[in-house]
Amino acid sequence: MSEFNSRDTAAFKGVWVFCEQREGAIMSTSYQLLSEGRKLANDLGVELCGVLLGHNMGEGAVKALGGYGADRVYLCDHPLLETYTTDGYTKVICDLVAEKKPEIFLIGATNIGRDLGPRCAARLHTGLTADCTHLDVDVAKYKEFLKTTSTIDVDNTVFEENTNLKMTRPAFGGHLMATIICPRFRPQMSTVRPGVMQTQPYDEAGAAKTVIDRVAVQLSKEDIHVDVLEVKKAAKKLVDLIGADVVVSVGRGISKDVAKGIALAEELADALGGVVGASRAVVDAGWITSDHQVGQTGKTVHPKIYVALGISGAIQHKAGMQDSECIIAVNKNESAPIFEVASYGITGDLFKVTPMLTEAIRALKASK
Amino acid sequence: MKLIVCVKQVPDTSGVVAVKEDGTMDRAAMDTITNHDDLAAVEAALQIKDATGCKVVVISMGPPPAEGMLRELLARGCDEAVLVSAREFGGSDTYATSQILAAAIKKVGVEEDDIILCGRQAIDGDTAQVGPQIAEKLHVPQVSYAADIQVEGKTVTVKRLLEDGYMTLKVQTPCLITCVKELNQPRYMSVGGIMEAYSKPYAVYNFETLKDDPLIDLDTIGLKGSPTNVYKSFSPPVKGAGMMLEGAGKEACEKLVALLDAKHLI
Amino acid sequence: MDFHLSKEQEMLRKMYREFAQNEVKPLAEEVDEKEMFPEETVKKMAKLGMMGIYFPKEYGGAGADVLSYAMCVEELAKVCGTTAVIVSSHTSLCCAPIFENGTDEQKAKYLPKLCSGQWLGAFGLTEPGAGTDAQGQQTTAVLDAKGENWILNGSKIFITNAGYANVFIIIAITGVTTDKRGRTKKEISAFIVERTDPGFSVGKHEKKMGIRGSSTCELIMEDCVIPKDRLLGKQGKGFNLAMATLDGGRIGIASQALGLGEGAIEEAIAYTKERVQFGRRISQFQNTQFQLADMHTRMQAAQFLVYSAAMKKQNHEPYSMDAAMAKLFAAEAASDVTRRAVQLFGGYGYTREYPVERMMRDAKITEIYEGTSEVQRMVISSNLGVK
């Protein structure tokens, strides 16, 4: 690390993706990031590398990273890397970055990625942009992106031409979008929100030709200052909002009878073959667990059908669901902002409307 | 033992959000609150104080009006407060902020058996970066996403949240822990606490106070010292309004279902 | 007069408001519906120092001032009239007379437990035959033969907090005096009675129109024996003590009325901005706007009177008339404003789905207890020298 100079930007080449594994299984976020990283590497004409830390990882899992776009996999195998620790992972990654000097380093914004990213960036003296939802290096592509997602008059705005990584993320709970750059230091680091980037189809040929680079890991017990006593999966199966085709969410409108409101949403979700989500207000009030939360601070979803029951539509909620294919809103207040993004709206009491809607769907399904 | 808690005053984005003509947030027109996760960190500290009688110091970087928030935290039971505030610190990104806060924490003094607590992330930026970056600058171990904290002498056992479960970790002091709001239910200020809030030790650290720390260099703090800059900021467009159905009865529901069916959504 | 709140008072207001919104408001409907005394809420308030706000720390109080106490009752009443009167009765009618009239021993014995909320307090003056006519007392207290104990006999009615209180200030007749012209007059004294004293019991629980969760009961003393040192203040000075206590109590009840009116306005503003009739939000109709303007103006005027009385008490200035004016005006304003709020809500306002009908029922009592509005007018006019 001593000779490492993050200001010597010209010395840095290549796009890296941190490929997170838990208990030997690669997280799906890693595939999303490789797919996205592939595009950036192509735009820059550089190599895409996956960085995998673990112990005794299966050959198939390593090769699979190539199937999602990695030209090269830096495989850091060490018994102390089997389970994530901030200290162990930070040291190995920073050593590798110092040696190989990538220009872009993407990390999934999982609970682990968001622990690791900042620690690495601070050690490497470079910038890190958190929880990004869009990445570009090419200005022309960035302008195309702005045309559909912003109110900026793109054609009459001056954009500085450069190949810096343009990292776009929601700010202030989704009220504003900010595109961040890190022009003076390398690597340009970003944590990327899970579920946002699309995974490209698996490519057998890519998997076959990916180069596996086994890294000589320098790590000892003394480097790690925490003891992992146990890793436990939650006993209750958490709701899979991101993977669901239909999400039926409840908001503050259920306050009159919380238990009934949630039960009605569950019935509707069941009829539609979906899961139950919730606004932040509902989670903050403790009416439902936080794994159900949709929005800026919760999960970003884009199901086929999103039903918002008694959700006023605060911008930070909309940030997490407005890209859904079809949005149905039920709210007593006809001027609720949720109707601004809804494909279909019903002004009415969710306690009355929801059962009728469930009934109508069941009737339709029965007739088919 | 002493506990140092980092807190941030943030605009309340859960209520009415004021946006200026140019699309930036009108912070002056919005209510400010103590960041939720930070309140969980304060409560965690106060619970440890209740059990051990240790001292709790709250520290915040922000403009002078953040004093009000710090006084409220003193009213909840914290013992001392430090406001880190200077023109030179303005415009700092997370990297630069962590440099400054780390220097301020060193000024307060980190001893063998101390613990630094932060909220996981602030609702205005949602970065979750400052805590781990402070830990790096102070060369202490970190545990983020804490959902349970047990302190026994110099050993701290933390339940760290993962998306699909949790991890239990043991770490020695001094260390830094970031807390999630699910960790606890923050206590209220008490009447007696409020009456004492303005007589407890309160300090302001400005550039002069911290400038001798090697972390504080005009090149590594403030807007100029921040590795990241804003390239563009913009407001998301309002999606065109969809179709409002007539009425809220059985007919409206059946019509909606028919529309969904026609689009092959069901 | 300076109406600028101190930084501490501003912070207290914020804390009371947060507490009221999060802890008191969610229970208010149940407290009313089930006539439920909010015991858990009282415990929480005790922990936060809300049961002894303006008493010194040496007695377990929080060391704040009378205005800070008035604001507490006000903020509680915005969401729950019952919870507000529990604090008001406890503070003004039990803690205050002990603090103001008690011996060092009495203060040391009772105040720390009362101010910390470990014990709840109440006050017994009213009797079946002595309401507004407080001189018509029947309850007696006589010293026993050895002169060691007082023996109390009689009953008190409509006693707030009775079912849960541990300490009661009881007004009783200790003798009859004859003046120079030969007219007899009852000698009235005050006593501290504990719930566990032999011969003391709590009787019938009243079913009320409003503040339904407050525990309003009868107190029965049948040869109730209490030690001699329970006499509060000087023997024969009990009537003055009771009247002075009620002066302070009126600040509490005025604050309760103030909060009820303000709470109803908050509800009405929120509702009228939501409710649509004739294609417009009803807040867009001038009638709604003017009604709310009048309602707010009345409550604002009430607030000035209430805060002014609280500040005068704090500064040890005469405040008897101020407290009477504050209570008279705030109570009548609260009744009017809550009634108008129900009207703005229309049919929904009359249902229990919304809190304004409860607020209207709660507000009515503020014109009656701790001196009816007629009594307040008597106090004010006599202070004006109009006889």
Image (spheres, rainbow, N blue to C red):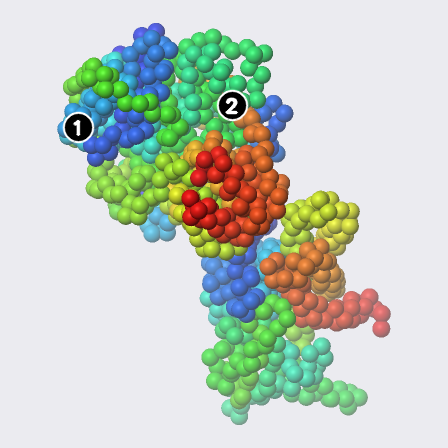
Query: On residue A57, which mark appears?
Result: 1
Give the vertical position of C299 relative to A12 (above or below). below
Residue B208 visible from this viewpoint: no
Comes first in the chain, label 1 or label 2: 1
Residue B241 visible from this viewpoint: yes
Q: Quadrant of the N terminus of chain B?
A: top left
Where does residue C183 sit, x and y in percent of width and height?
77, 89
Query: On residue A193, which mark appears?
Result: none
The residue lying toward the viewer, choosing from A360 and C269, is: A360
Assign a secondary structure to mark 1: loop
Assign a secondary structure to mark 2: helix
Q: Mark 1 — on which chain does it sit?
A: A
Where does residue B42 sit, x and y in percent of width and height?
41, 43
The residue lying toward the viewer, choosing from A325 and C79, is: A325
Question: In the shown orientation, is residue A58 left or right of residue A104?
Answer: left
The residue lying toward the viewer, choosing from B30 and A162, is: A162
Q: Give the residue at mark 2.
A: A149
Give the vertical position of C143 relative to C375 (above or below). below
- The residue located at (16%, 24%) in the rendering is A59
Q: Amino acid at mark 2?
A: Thr
